[in-house]
Image: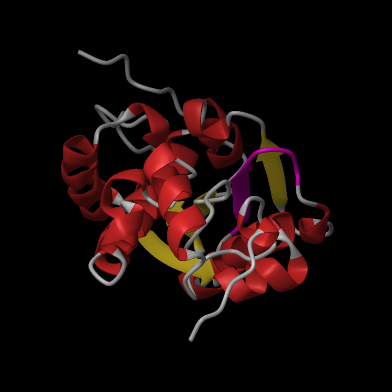
């Protein structure tokens, strides 16, 4: 049985009367193709430990399907946000990741405090928020957001793979695997590729 993650960060806030604590994380930051997807998740104050919840990178795809349902059953609110590959190319991946997280929080409605995976983004200056390095391994709220974001993004890449099967997105989710890079070198980028990313930017291409 997996050791259950403690609510150390959430309990510190709940004890101060801050009840709507949103965990926020993104998925797809390092991919060569597809959008970056973020999720925000508010768990109930005093939530019981959630068995199996941990960093999404440590979970299998079949596990995540069950965990998503558990999260949806337990959460007070869950919302998703995204930034497209064109937005990524225009403003850079870091800024696009923050944009996706802000969009997820905007959709969730009222939130009192945000726990954000990673270093604190300066764009959240002045808001009730903090960044937690390795937060998806330390905060259940962030871990839930991580699982939700990765599940949605993987599902999206499976659907896009049906249009472009040569790139293997159904298994690599747009990351730069050997199969993906070889197809990229042979066929060139699709409209779903991030042109600002190497090795995509190094290729002469046409969308015709």
Image x and y of residue 173, in percent: 37, 50
Q: Is residue 116 magenta?
A: yes
Q: Is residue 154 visible?
A: no
Residue pictured at 58% horizontal, 65% vertical: 100
| Quadrant of the image occupied by residue 6 | top left
Q: Is residue 86 left or right of residue 139?
A: right
Pick the residue in front: 80 or 127.
Answer: 80
- Outermost residue on the bottom side: it is 208
Which residue is pictured at 65% across the width and 66% down the height? 88
Residue 154 at x, y = what percent? 33, 53
For the residue pair 7 and 183, the one nearer the viewer reads as 183
Q: Is residue 106 above or below residue 207?
A: above
Q: Is the residue 11 above or below the residue 174 in the image?
A: above
Task: Residue 73 in the image: state x and y as whole percent.
Answer: 20, 52
- Examine the rendering and report whether any part of residue 168 can be seen: yes
Q: Which residues are magenta?
A: 112-120
- 175 with respect to 179 (left or right): right
**Figure quadrant of the N terminus:** top left
Q: How is the image coloured?
A: secondary structure
- Count of number-bearing discs: 0
Q: Position of residue 31 (x, y in %)?
A: 52, 50
Task: Confirm whether the magenta stretch covers residue 74.
Answer: no
Taking the spot 50% from the left edge, 34% from the top edge, the residue there is: 136
């Amino acid at each position: 049985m997996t050791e259950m993650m403690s609510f150390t960060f959430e309990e510190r806030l709940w004890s101060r009367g801050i009840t709507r604590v949103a965990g926020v994380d993104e998925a797809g930051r390092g991919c060569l193709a597809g959008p970056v997807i973020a999720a925000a998740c508010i768990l109930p104050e005093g939530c019981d430990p959630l068995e199996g919840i941990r960093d999404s990178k440590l979970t299998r795809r079949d596990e995540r399907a069950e965990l998503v349902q558990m999260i949806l059953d337990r959460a007070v609110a869950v919302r998703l946000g995204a930034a497209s590959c064109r937005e990524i190319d225009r403003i850079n991946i870091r800024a696009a990741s923050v944009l996706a997280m802000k969009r997820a929080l905007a959709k969730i409605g009222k939130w009192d405090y945000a726990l954000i995976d990673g270093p604190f983004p300066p764009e959240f200056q002045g808001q009730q928020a903090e960044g937690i390095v390795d937060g998806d391994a330390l905060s259940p709220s962030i871990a839930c957001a991580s699982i939700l974001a990765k599940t949605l993004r993987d599902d999206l890449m499976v659907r896009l793979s049906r249009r472009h099967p040569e790139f293997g997105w159904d298994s690599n989710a747009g990351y730069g695997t050997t199969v993906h890079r070889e197809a990229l070198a042979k066929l060139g980028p699709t409209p779903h590729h991030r042109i600002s990313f190497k090795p995509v930017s190094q290729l002469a291409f046409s969308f015709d």
